[in-house]
Amino acid sequence: MTTTISLAIVNLLLVIIVAPFYEGVIRKLKAVVHSRKGPPLRQPYLDLLKLLGKERLEVGGNPLFSFAPVLTFGSVLVAALLTPMGASPPLGFAGDLIVLVYFLALASVGIMLGGTSTGNPYGALGTAREMMLAMVVEIIVVGSLIVAVIHSHSFDLMHISSWYRESGPVLSMVIAAIPFFLVLQVQLGKLPFDIPDADQEIMGGPFIEAGGPSLALYKWSYFAKQIILASLFLEVFIPWPKTGVIPVDILINLVKVLVVIALVGVIDAVNPRIRIDQAVRYFIGIWVVLVFAIAFALIGV
Amino acid sequence: MITLFAATIILGLILTALTRRSRRLCGTIGVGTVTIMSGILFCVAYRVFTGGPRNLSKPLMVIPSLGAELTVSVDYLSALFLVIIGLVSFAGTLYSFRYMDLYPSQGIARFYHCLILFIAGMVGVVSVSDMFFFFVFWEFMTLTSYFLVIYEKEDQVVLRAGLKYFIMTHVGTAAMFIGAILLQTRVGSFAFAALREALSGMVEAHPVQLSFVLGLFVLGFGTKAGMYPVGGWLPDAHPAAPSGVSAMLSGVMIKMGVYGFVRFFFFLLPVSTHTFAWGIVIAACGAVSLFMGTVSALLQHDFKRLLAFSSIGQMGYILLGIGTGLAFYEINPLLSVVATMAGMYHLVNHAVFKGLLFLNAGAILYKTGTRDLNRLSGLYSVMPLTAWVTLIAALSIAGMPPFNGFVSKWLIYQTTIIGGISVPVFILFGVVAIFISTVTIAYFIKFFGTCFGGEMGSELETSLRPGLDVPYTMRIPQNIFALLCVLLGLFPWIPLQMIHAGLTGSLYGNSLPHLSSVFGMSEIGLIPMMGGVQAGVWFPLMGLLVFGGCLMVAVIISRVGSPESRSVPIWNCGEVYDTDEVRYRAQSFYLPLASHFERLVSWEAPPIHLKKPERIYRGIDFDKVLFYPLVTAMLRFSEMFRRTHVGIPQVYMLFQVIGFILVVAVIVWLTLM
């Protein structure tokens, strides 16, 4: 009981307090790749603090507009409680893998509700793009996790992770890891797939009208998602090394997450943005890889 | 009970007929009648669930020459369906009380007559245990619903939709009837018990004939259930009907097809290799219809049509669930029970959230007078309640936690994927189901965003009915359904207990596992056990508690800087536009993706140069090759008779004489035989 509660607090602190630090790392890395000096590592914290103090703008009198960021951030926090971050997921006794995926989807729904609530054409356009990407991408997330489910016969993340840790690298899991990694770019809103909120093109899409605390919550959810998805990826597909001592495992996980996020950042820094139809076609191509992974898993390799 | 029920119906019919001059009075009597009927249904269901199945001691009517007996028997499965019928009928009728103001030129008594008989027909379908009278009530239900669909009888589009509905369901019913007759000829009785004997006799002796009969039944029930492709009547007929009736058509009537599937395949068909084969067939039909229905819904701009297509999709989930249950009966009995119950649970949930969505669609139609999503915007300011209940229903149907749709879909994913480990094709079905769940979110974002988001256009503003939201008799049913969406999601144990009881006497027989050995010991959560492994876990109350806490954290964080509020207009990057001019309309949503799907769901020839491709595509269009030719043939046949009516008495006399001679000749021939 005490372990669960302390793990819950650790997970929440990680996604609320530590997450902006990773964003700072990405920004710094991106600046280095671009031969710039870049902002200091604490810049995301300063941004969030400043946004929290700014005035709250009400557009069109629709309360969904103010509710949407709360819904998004709240769902992301629940998702954080369902994700194993080095140790077992604190809310694992009440929800499994599919519950986690659907709370992440609920976060996207929050963004989309906010985007369409104002009637801003850029907001609606960004929402439609976000939804199109979600349609082709969500199934890749679930599909690659299904490969693990087929092997471990369970939807319990802890069970999946410990199965893979013991039975070593499996071909189908290695294949399934590739689509999942490629999808991280979309889920975290990074280039070449930051199509829904393309700042230079449609001024942030769903977030165009959001300002002050609302924008802070949206940004924060994205930072939190970085840790959640990277941890999920690592716990399912690269669960080594594990010591069994919970604080050490959490630290190891944080370092691993840093590596994954740095990779995501580098891909973000060296790529141009592609069009939505190109992205859709690209991910439909990735479905084929997934089919192979599932087929291999079914024959047991 | 049954006399009281019949008396209510007859009294209701007479009184509505007498008061047809006054719309309000007639409506009050109609609603009152249906309320009493629903009350009786709830009462019967309660007595069955607490005191066991109830049968009438002797049949109400016997036709010895056919071997048909009108035996009324309400078991747990029937009781479950009676609850759904009672609930949705009451809500739909109460809703129609004011909604029928939309049709001032149509007679109101006609509507309530058909409605009351329609409900009676559905009640009959689920509570008889004789195939012949099952058909009688089935036809009763179909015909009355046909008249409800074509209620607006001057509109050509509505009539066309009604005709399509009439023909397609009757082709299905005919198939089913042929199947039943084939069985009846073996045992000489239509009683369910006798049919079971006939089926078990055929398993060994005539497997091919049995498959043929089962195929006919799948066709018949599938047509009613809106299964793809034979459910093609659904997207035309549902939007044509008044919205309260659409809710009942989609909420309960198409569920009668599923009742047929369950009654026939789980209660009558003996366990054999056929169980597995037909389980896979039903699951595959479910997977196909959930894909095609939902993807078609994505491309619609008429919101009632969108909801009708979505019904095809959701029926696909239900069929996938019960098909999986049937297929895994021998391989993995626990998984089979979970899958069947998941399908039935989704049926209950679908009745609630699709009923709610049709009521909301009706509210929008009532308020604005249009069904075109491209013309709608900013309705939140005039109908906030409808907006919130639509959001709840949309999140439920999209399977978002903690609402009810999530729980049933979650169980269906688990069973198909775990089942797929031993029968791989189910992995495909499961993945399709998960993919389609995202597509469901997509069309509801489009529906919700374009209806309620943004600012209202000036053209729309002038055409609105006065007053905030809709009349309260329309709001009550909306609220009941919305509340049920939440409660059924938070306390899944209650509906699952009823469904579990409903499976008593099915093919699981005495080996039906206890509920706690399927879903774990805790009554506030579900821990499905399938074949010795704990597959997943979901505690809705715990989830809601944590979710609420997290939302509080989010609110606190957003308030921590104590920011001030200020109202601002929409920011179009500094340009000044009229809102209507730059609005992002429903038709623009998902265009790049739609191009991938359009070829799948519309019947236009692709740009590939096959030999005579158009002939293939024309062949798939059932409207053109099957249903309309049938209608024209029928009309031409009737035309022949019309020509004989020349209006000269002598000619009629001649017909009579010829007829008389023929009859005498036949009788003489028969006696000589």
Image: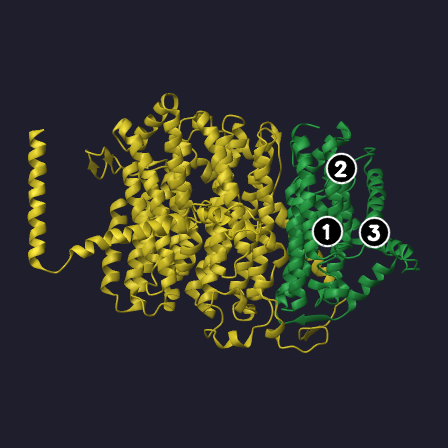
Colour in which chain B is drawn: yellow
Looking at the picture, tell me which residue is in the foreground, A207 or A122: A122
Q: Amino acid at mark 2?
A: Phe
Q: Is residue B558 left or right of residue B532?
A: right
Determine if marks 1 and 2 fall on one subunit. Answer: yes
Tell me if residue B585 comes above or below residue B622 in the rendering.
below
Q: Secondary structure at mark 2?
A: helix
Give the crowd class for mark 2: few <14, some 14-19, many >=20 residues within 10 Å.
many
Rounded to the nearest angstrom, the CA distance separating label 2 from label 3 is 20 Å
- Name the residue beneath numbered marker 2: A237
The residue depicted at 78 percent of the width and 48 percent of the height is A227
- Name the residue beneath numbered marker 1: A187
For the view shown, which residue lies furthest in the top direction?
B204
Q: Which chain is home to disc 1?
A: A
Tell me if residue A260 comes above or below residue B474 in the rendering.
above
Colour in which chain A is drawn: green
Q: Amino acid at mark 3?
A: Gly
- Name the residue beneath numbered marker 3: A265
Residue B542: x %, y % from top left: 62, 45
Give the crowd class for mark 1: few <14, some 14-19, many >=20 residues within 10 Å.
many
Rounded to the nearest angstrom, the CA distance separating label 3 from label 1 is 13 Å
Looking at the picture, tell me which residue is in the foreground, B444 or B278: B278
Looking at the picture, tell me which residue is in the foreground, B130 or A75: B130
**Which image quarter: residue A142?**
top right
The residue depicted at 73 percent of the width and 34 percent of the height is A173
Q: Is residue A46 left or right of residue B435?
A: right
Q: Secondary structure at mark 3?
A: helix
Rounded to the nearest angstrom, the CA distance separating label 1 from label 2 is 17 Å
